[in-house]
Structure formats: C-alpha cells, structure tokens
Image (cartoon, rainbow, N blue to C red):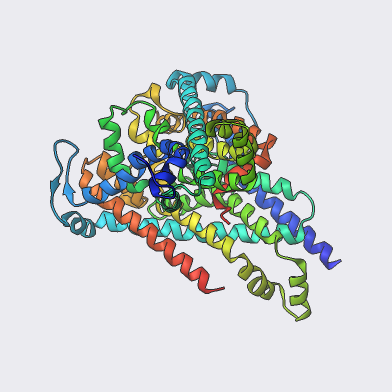
Amino acid sequence: MEKFVSKYITFLFVTILMLIFIFPLIWMLILSTNSRTEIYSFPPPLLPGTELVNNFQNLIAQIPFFMNLWNSVYIAVANSALILFVCSFAAYGFARFTNAPGNRWIFAMVIAAIMIPPLAGIIPWFMQMRWLGWIDTHWPLIIPAAAYPFGVFWMYQYIKQAVPNELYEACKMDGASDFRIYIQMVIPLIRPGLGALAILSFLNSWQNFQLPLIVLNSTEKFTIPLALTNLTSQFGTDVAGIMLGTSISVVPIFIAFILASRHFIEGLTSGSVKS
Amino acid sequence: MKVAKGSIVYRMKQNKMFYISVAPFLMIFLMFSLFPIVASFFLGFTKWNGVGLPEFNGIDNYIQLFKDPIFIKSIYNTIYIWFFSTLFTLGLAFILAYLVNHYIDRAKGFFRVVFLFPLLVAPALTAIMISVIFSTNAGIVNSIISLFTEGVFTYEWLRSQFWVKPLIVLIIVWRWTGYHFILYIAGLQTISKELYDAAEIDGANVFQKIMNVTLPLMTPILLVSVITATVGGIQIFDEPYVLTQGTGGINNSGVSMGMYLYQTAFEYFNFGLAAAQSFVLFLMILGITLVNARLLRNRT
C-alpha cells in the first residue's frame, strides 16, 4: 500500500512538472493563432484562436520569412553534409592507419580541441571572414564549422567498434583502393553513427544565433533565429507574429523528433558519451 | 632515391592515404580554429580598431579590463548565471531521474521525449518566448498574479535589475533539464538493484542510499554533466542578448562576458581589448573545468 501511494504521488509530481515544462510551447501555439487585441486583453486567451492566416500574412509582410527559412534549411543541410564527410573521412584515417607517423599526436590535438570554447578565437575569426570577403554571405556558417573535433572523435569510436581490422585486409586483397574501401565498406557500416552526428550538427546550425549575428547584415540573408529576434526590436511587439514564426521553425523539428526519438536522443547526448 | 624499409619516410609512403584523409579536416581546423585562437592571444596585447595594423601596447588591455567596472560586473553576472543555472538544472534533473527510475514503471520513454522538447528550440527563440511570458501587459505571469491582486498587475520583469539574471537562469533550466535527465536515467539504470537492497538491509534510508550508493557510482556522469553545463554557461550569449534586446539590461544587470566581448568588438570596435576579454574567458573555462574534474575525482 505504501509503495502504491508513493508511486502514485511521484507519478502525479512528475506529470505536473512535465506540464509546466511544455506549457511555454503550448502557449506559443495558442498565441500564434490569436489576434493582437486578444493577446493584450485581460484575461489572456487560453484557447487557440482564429487569426492564424492573418498573423501569417502580417509576418511575411514584415520580414522575408520564406527566404529566412530557406537560408536556415540550406545552411544547416550544407554544413551538416560537410561535417559528415570531413569528420568521418578523417576518422577513417585515424582509425585505420595507426602506423602512420604523426597519427598519435594529431589525434591528441583533435581530442584537446574538443574542450576549446568557440568564443576564444572569435575576433581573429571575424577578421578572417572579412579578409576573405565572406561578410554578409553564408560561407562563414558553412565552411569553418566543418572541422568539428567532436565529430571526428565520435566517428573514430564508431569506426573502431564497427569495422574490424581484418575487413580492411580482405578488401585490400580484392584490390579495392583505400578510397573505395571508405566509400563502399566503411560508410555503410557506420550509418547509425553518421545519423546521430547529422542530427547533432543540423540542430547546432539550425539554432545558431551568435555567428549569424556577427557576419550577416542584410535581412534577406538572415537565418530564422536572427530574423525573428530582429522582429522584436524593430516592430516593438508583434507577439503573435513572433510566436507564429517560432512555431513554424520548431514544429517540423518536434515532428521529426517524435518520429525518430531514439536517434535524436543518441545524437543530442552523443556529446557526453565519452568512454 | 631509395628509401630504407622501416624508416619514417617509408612508413609515410606506405600510409599515404592517412594524410589524404585527414587533410580536409586539418586544413579547415588549422585555418579557422587553431589560428584564430593563437592570433587572439597576440591581439590581446595590441590596440586595434580593425583598420590598419594593430599597435602593440603590452598588458594595457588587461590593466584596463580589470579597472573597468562593467567588465567586473560581466564576470559577476556570468558566474551568477553559470552557478545557479548549473545547480538548479542538475539538481532538478537528478531528482527527476531518481524518481522516474525508482518509482515509475510505465511511460519512461514518454517522459524522456517530452522533457527533451525545450532543447529543440533555439536559445535565442526560447529567450523570446520567456520575454513574452513575462512581458508587462500581455504576459501570462502578470495575468496569473492579477487574479490574486486588486486591479491588473503590471510588474516590469524585463526592466528589473534583479530579475534579469533569474530569468536567464530560468531559460537555461527549462532548456537543459531534459538533457541531463536523460544522462542520469542512463547512469541510474546501470546501478544494480542488489546494491540498494544491501544498503537497505544495513538500515539505510532513502537519503543515505542516495549519498552512499547512487552518487559515488554516478560520479563519472556527473562530471561530464557539470563540464557540459560549465562550458556552455560561461560562454552564454544568446539568452541575455535577446532578453535585453542587445542592451545588456538596465545598468548592465544582464550583461554576460560573451555579450560584453561582442559589444567591445562590434559596437565599440576595440578589437584588441575584445581579444583580451576572450582570452580571460578561455582561461576561466579552462580553470573551472580543471577544478571540477579534480573535485569530483577526489570524492571517489
């Protein structure tokens, strides 16, 4: 009986806490469907309203929303694709050619680099971008982040565990080149690891705010977080529009997360699973 | 030239593919990660407005920084935000994980998924959401308080010098609790039930069990979790920037080190000073991480 009661109370407690946690998200959806007057009236609206279409028209009248959405999508896809290739290819080198002079100490440098905070070199980084003529372009958000030390470490562990050494020898005997071994044998074997890294790097890029803020100047070049935060300062308080824009940028991610929660959890927590 | 078998050059030739495969990574890494950090260290000893050549001025930047009350305030704010957000996030995540692991049999997967939702929202956008929830005239928080007060309650949370930092802490706790919760659940599941049973036979209560069984076995995971929270917390930028609309709050009450660095460089164009700031930030993260690692290791 006592066990039953404590179970019941705990379940209730955790459920209430969960409701508090998802409240802001539900509140965001409610506000994005209500008109400005409804939002500012007292008591505030607690149910979905009927102004969704109207709010959306207001939103696209103020910022090039579709453009911003497209920028976010293609930058995140391009950056993630580059990370997957660069990191898994390097990891293949580290994992397979253990005899190569320099392997050990270059790998040690990669591990040490995981701990380096990105802000540490931000000033010279910005100067480089200016010198390359990359200010107000999307290159700074795609190319530099491709060298993701954690990605190399993560893929290295995956390759070590998924690809036995004998397999390389067997392929070599069959006359396959080293590059073909990477493309045709290693990549298919490490697909789950690549998936987790893809999710992690996509979200990193999708949520990035500071670097776009530093390098982008024109509204058409903005990514979604930058465009929406700019809306706050520029037009005072179009609460409905901002909430609608935020909803549009997170709802697809929520759906993807629910459909593939196992992979998302692996991807998001991969940063902490260090053996 | 004939290369002797076993020599370094021979081994390098044998492993040509190694150098090809790490080349793309190394080139991007050396150019855009390592070089800026080294350059930043040297830039910290110069005066430079971004045009022309940097001018060497010794440790002037560092002297100026530690005489600057706003810089000192940004350090205080950053440590405040880091400390309380880490404490509350990790504490709440641990309690949740313990309760779910020990008392809840069904819907564990469901809770894991739902508590992770906030992490999928960009930090800048969560800051917008919190500022809407706490806004003066349309905020649900003021509306709820209004139910209990006479007239309409219109407290200006976002203009309060006291509340800016707790609101930033709230954003971090909301976003990150689910993440640490999942880490702890995974850790707790590896602790065998027999250890708890043995402690129970010895007459240990719940808190003694947590102190003597759970925490020591969870140390490696706690370490990872503290370090993750620290590296993120010290560099915090998006949340204070968006919450204060880039101003840093009334009287700089919400300015973080990352944000002050941004202002120094991109609003005042004092790049040498900003580089010195980023170096201080770097040392702080390094220091706190090493101390954390040592403290947690000593306890086991």
Left-right relation of B57 to A136: left
Q: What residue is at 58 percent from the left and 66 percent from the top?
A: B219
Q: Outermost residue, front direction? A: B2
Q: Position of residue B53 (x, y in %)?
A: 14, 39
Give the total of numbered labels: 0
Q: Position of residue B109 (x, y in %)?
A: 73, 47
Q: In the picture shown, does residue A35 fall above or below B206?
A: above
Q: Give B26 or B242, whichever is nearer the viewer.
A: B26
What quarter of the picture does the N terminus of chain A occupy? bottom right
What quarter of the picture does the C terminus of chain A occupy? bottom right
Left-right relation of A252 to A37: right
Q: In the picture shown, does residue B16 fall above or below B297?
A: above
Q: Position of residue A64 (x, y in %)?
A: 44, 20
Left-right relation of B95 to B266: right
Q: Give B207 or B127, whichever is nearer the viewer.
A: B207
Q: In the picture shown, does residue A65 fall above or below B246?
A: above
Q: Give B41 or A63, whichever is nearer the viewer.
A: B41
User: Is residue A187 something that shows in the picture?
Assistant: yes
Q: What residue is at 66 percent from the left and 44 percent from the top?
A: B114
Q: Outermost residue, right direction? A: A1
User: Is residue B248 something that shows in the picture?
Assistant: no
Task: State the image quarter where residue A257 is shown.
Answer: top right
Q: Give A166 or B184, whichever is nearer the viewer.
A: A166
Q: Position of residue B276 (x, y in %)?
A: 25, 52
Q: What residue is at 46 percent from the left and 50 percent from the top?
A: B168
Q: In the picture shown, does residue B135 fall above or below A273?
A: above
